[in-house]
Every structure is written in C-alpha cells, then in structure tokens.
Image: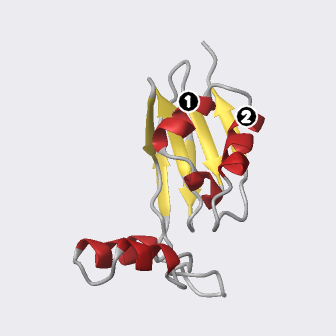
Amino acid sequence: MRWISVGDSPLYLVARGALGRLNADHSMVPQIDALVARGIISPEEAARHPGRHTLREAVMGQSLTLIDEGRRGLDPGDRLLVCSDGIQTLDAAGIVRHAAEPVQALIDSVLEAKAPAQDNVTVIKLEREE
C-alpha cells in the first residue's frame, strides 16, 4: 500500500490490537499542544483556541511543503482507517475496539460521544482478510 497525505485527516493502521497513525497532523494542533507543554497556555485554553484546526498550508495554487507519503505492507487482520478529524473524538482504545466492527459502529460511537466541538466524522475502512 502507498499513500500521500496533506492536511489534518488521520490515516490510522490498526494492527495486532494497537493503533498507529501513519501521517502527521498538518493543522495548528501540534503547535498549540507545544504551547501547553511549555506552560504558555493551559490545556483548557488549547481546547478552545480559535486557530486549533487551521491548516498550516492550503492548496491555493502554491507549492506545498507539508506532505506525508509512505509505503507499507498490510498483514492479515490489519485495518487501515482513512478518517476525517472527527474520529479524534474517540481515544485510541475506542478506535481499536470498534475497528473490527462494521464501519457504521465506529461512526455511531463518535456521534454518541456528543463532543461539543465535534462537527463531522467520515471513515473509510480497508481490511486485509486472513
């Protein structure tokens, strides 16, 4: 499998019961989280930060520098989840738990969480069969 990614939509691999992210978050979230780690703003301020989901680069006819690409084989039982950022309403254990179920169960669990800032969820699941 090969991928190219630009933006903040996570590409997750669920393998052997563990969740791994294959691409980086190109939004302001990592920079804002760094401000929290340095004690400049509080976690509460970070959660409400108005620029939190602003992309650091946009496609406006200019060259992009924040591009992730990779290549990886999939083992039997591996699941690849191509998601919108709404999936991050769930913690890693929740994503792994629902990844083996039909994709609608994963989407339903995000919607049931009723997180205040959650405005969308999209999930495409690719699964390598045994």
User: Which element is circle 1 on?
Assistant: helix
Residue at point 49%, 67% (across, down): 67
Q: Quadrant of residue 4?
A: bottom right
Residue 122 to residue 36: above or below: above
In the picture of the structure, the residue carrying the numbered disc 2 is: 105
Rendered view: 48 above or below 75: below
Q: Residues within 10 Å of mark 2 (few under 14, many from 20)?
A: few
**3 lies left or right of 83:** left
Q: Residue at x 30, y 79 (%)?
A: 35
How far across and down, in percent of the image, does residue 98 sit? 62, 32
The percent coordinates of residue 81 (x first, y second) are 61, 42
Q: What x and y, as percent, mark residue 44? A: 42, 74
Q: Is residue 125 left or right of residue 64?
A: right
The CA span between labels 1 and 2 is 10 Å
Q: Is residue 115 above or below residue 108?
A: below
Reading the image, the residue beneath label 1 is 97
Residue ranking furthest to the left: 38
Residue in the foreground of this view, choosing between 59 and 13: 13
- Residue 3 pos. (x, y %): 56, 50
Q: Is residue 105 left or right of residue 98?
A: right
Q: Secondary structure at mark 2?
A: helix
Residue located 59% across and 37% down the image:
80
